[in-house]
Image (spheres, rainbow, N blue to C red):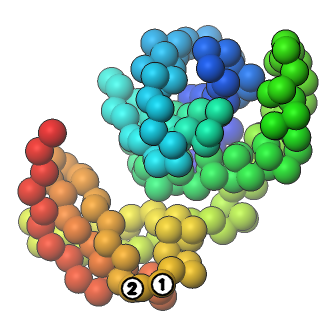
Amino acid sequence: MSLNYETDISFINISHGDSTLFEYKPPASFKSFSLDLNVIKQNKINDIFFHLNRGNSKIVYIRKDNLVYSIATEVEKIQFQVLEAIIEQVIKEFNATFEIDIILSYSTISPSIFTAFKDEVVKILVDFDSLELIKKVAVFCRICDTTHFIHVKRSFIDNKDAYPIPLVYTHLGHSIMCYIDKNYQVRGVELVHITG
Ligand SMILES: [Zn+2]
């Protein structure tokens, strides 16, 4: 079954402090993610992608100065790199659409300013495949004796100073380090041990 990001993404949230400026939820979704969002908003580390597993959900979030952007899915086969690519595109469009620094300088911010941004988000989700922000990379894991297809953000590979780029792929309870060259070919794979 092919993916439908418009329904497969459980939420996209843009927050400032404790307030939600913008939230996308798929049609007919009544789920609340406020507990997870509270955890996310406490994290002060800037400009780093964080991954969370919560029940069946995968959540990705990133703080960009005053704003925290987050996205979640319950669809197992949507990989964290795909969530990162979607949220990167949301960040790009959001900042192209709004003069955020000026809006944040207002003493009160009405979330209604951002309501129409939902159309932009739907467009990103519906057109996501044609944006070509993701590449599919085949990698053979000798632990489970299987070729896997990992989804890699182009922004993670393109225009880097040095190759190959290391990426850890966690699946079925184990993790492998994949070294990906600039042509999206895997140059080496090794088992990595992980704790936490
Ligand atoms: Zn494996």
At horizontal 35% and vertical 26% (from top left) the residue drawn is 54
Q: Is mark 2 within 8 Å of ligand 1?
A: no
Q: Nearer the viewer, residue 105 or 61?
A: 105
Number of on-image labels: 2
Q: Is residue 129 above or below residue 84?
A: below
Q: Is residue 113 visible?
A: yes
Percent x, y of residue 57 = 41, 30
Q: Is residue 55 above or below residue 147?
A: above
Q: Is residue 145 visible?
A: no
Percent x, y of residue 119 = 85, 37
The residue wearing badge 2 is 163
The residue wearing badge 1 is 161
Position of 146 with respect to 121 (left or right) is left
At horizontal 53% and vertical 13% (from top left) the residue drawn is 34
Q: Is residue 174 above or below residue 12?
A: below
The quadrant the C terminus occupies is top left
Percent x, y of residue 168 = 28, 62
Gap between marks 2 and 1, in whole Å? 7 Å
- The three-letter amino acid code for the residue at tag 2 is Tyr
- The three-letter amino acid code for the residue at tag 1 is Asp
At horizontal 30% and vertical 78% (from top left) the residue drawn is 179
Q: Specify the label residue 50 is tagged with.
A: none
Instruction: Using the rendered view, name the quadrant where residue 121 is placed.
Output: top right
Position of 173 with respect to 76 (left or right) is left
Judged from the image, the secondary structure of the residue bearing numbered disc 1 is loop
Q: Nearer the viewer, residue 181 or 67?
A: 67
Q: Is residue 191 above or below residue 53?
A: below
